[in-house]
Image (cartoon, rainbow, N blue to C red):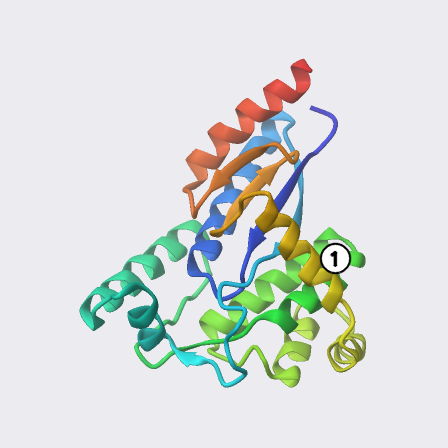
């Protein structure tokens, strides 16, 4: 292929399976480069808990209330996801425990919209920084200082990030994008939408992404 595939990665920054999925997708794309298959990724907003208060919730209590999981089941799931994340994204450190918290992510998505206007690589760097801010560092994603530090870690202008957060910019855009993806049937994440037509759901291993993208690329080339 000469034209990169367009991939919309619909996700939330407090979704552990989104870490797994992004790691698997990136690994698959690295492998496929040798076959001339490349892609440009745009990160699209999805809030797992849009009504969550600014103080967030204890993750174990949140999961118990939302899914009916026992503490033992939650601990086993955290251990399994942590192992999958380490496998899918070498070097990524996921530190989820019974005392971890989950946060409202609307402001994080506003910041990602801002980063996206500066280019896909900037947005990708901020996405990775936000994942680490939450899962590795356990920081409060509703705190403007935390978010601006994440922007700085991603190589973005901290003053510009602070202005976006203080001004409320990109709020309408984020709400519109979320509504758009929900209208297209996306109700769980990660959802990997290729060329606006093909859906790969969930935190898949690299081999699954590789096979699916190879088939899509072949169809696109034939068309």
Q: Secondary structure at mark 1?
A: helix
Q: Position of residue 45 (x, y in %)?
A: 62, 58
The residue sitting at 54% across, 23% down in the picture is 215
In this rendering, is residue 35 above or below 8?
A: above
**Of residues 26 and 11, the one drawn nearer to the viewer in this rendering:** 11
Visible in this render: residue 71?
yes
Please indicate whether residue 129 sits to the left or right of residue 56 in the image.
Answer: right
Quadrant of image for the N terminus:
top right
Q: Position of residue 84 (x, y in %)?
A: 35, 53
Q: Quadrant of residue 95?
A: bottom left
The residue sitting at 41% across, 66% down in the picture is 94
How many discs appear? 1
Visible in this render: residue 9?
no
In this rendering, is residue 101 above or below 114?
A: below
Q: Which residue is mark 1?
A: 116
Q: Position of residue 29 (x, y in %)?
A: 57, 38
Can you name the residue that lies furthest to the front here?
183
Quadrant of image for the C terminus:
top right
Please indicate whether residue 57 sits to the left or right of residue 43 in the image.
Answer: left
Give neighbour class at mark 1: few <14, some 14-19, many 20+ (Cα, 10 Å).
Answer: some
Q: Position of residue 141 (x, y in %)?
A: 56, 77
The residue sitting at 73% across, 78% down in the picture is 165
Please indicate whether residue 109 sits to the left or right of residue 205 in the image.
Answer: right
Q: Quadrant of residue 5?
A: top right
Please indicate whether residue 74 sits to the left or right of residue 132 in the image.
Answer: left
Q: Quadrant of residue 38?
A: top right
């Amino acid at each position: 292929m000469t034209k990169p595939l367009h991939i919309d990665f619909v996700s939330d920054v407090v979704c552990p399976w989104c870490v797994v999925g992004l790691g698997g997708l990136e690994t698959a794309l690295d492998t496929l480069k040798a076959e001339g298959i490349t892609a440009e990724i745009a990160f699209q907003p999805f809030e797992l808990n849009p009504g969550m208060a600014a103080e967030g919730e204890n993750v174990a209590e949140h999961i118990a209330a939302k899914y009916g999981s026992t503490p033992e089941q939650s601990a086993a799931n955290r251990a399994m996801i942590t192992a999958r994340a380490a496998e899918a994204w070498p070097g990524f450190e996921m530190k989820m425990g019974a005392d971890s918290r989950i946060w409202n992510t609307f402001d994080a998505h506003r910041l990602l919209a801002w980063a996206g206007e500066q280019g896909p690589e900037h947005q990708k760097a901020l996405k990775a920084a936000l994942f680490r801010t939450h899962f590795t560092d356990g920081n409060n994603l509703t705190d403007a200082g935390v978010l601006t530090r994440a922007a700085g870690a991603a190589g973005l202008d901290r003053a510009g990030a602070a202005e976006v957060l203080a001004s409320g910019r990109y709020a309408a855009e984020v709400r519109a994008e979320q509504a758009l993806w929900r209208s297209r049937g996306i109700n769980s994440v990660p959802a990997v939408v290729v060329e606006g037509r093909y859906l790969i759901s969930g935190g898949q291993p690299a081999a699954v992404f590789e096979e699916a993208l190879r088939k899509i690329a072949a169809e696109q080339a034939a068309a």
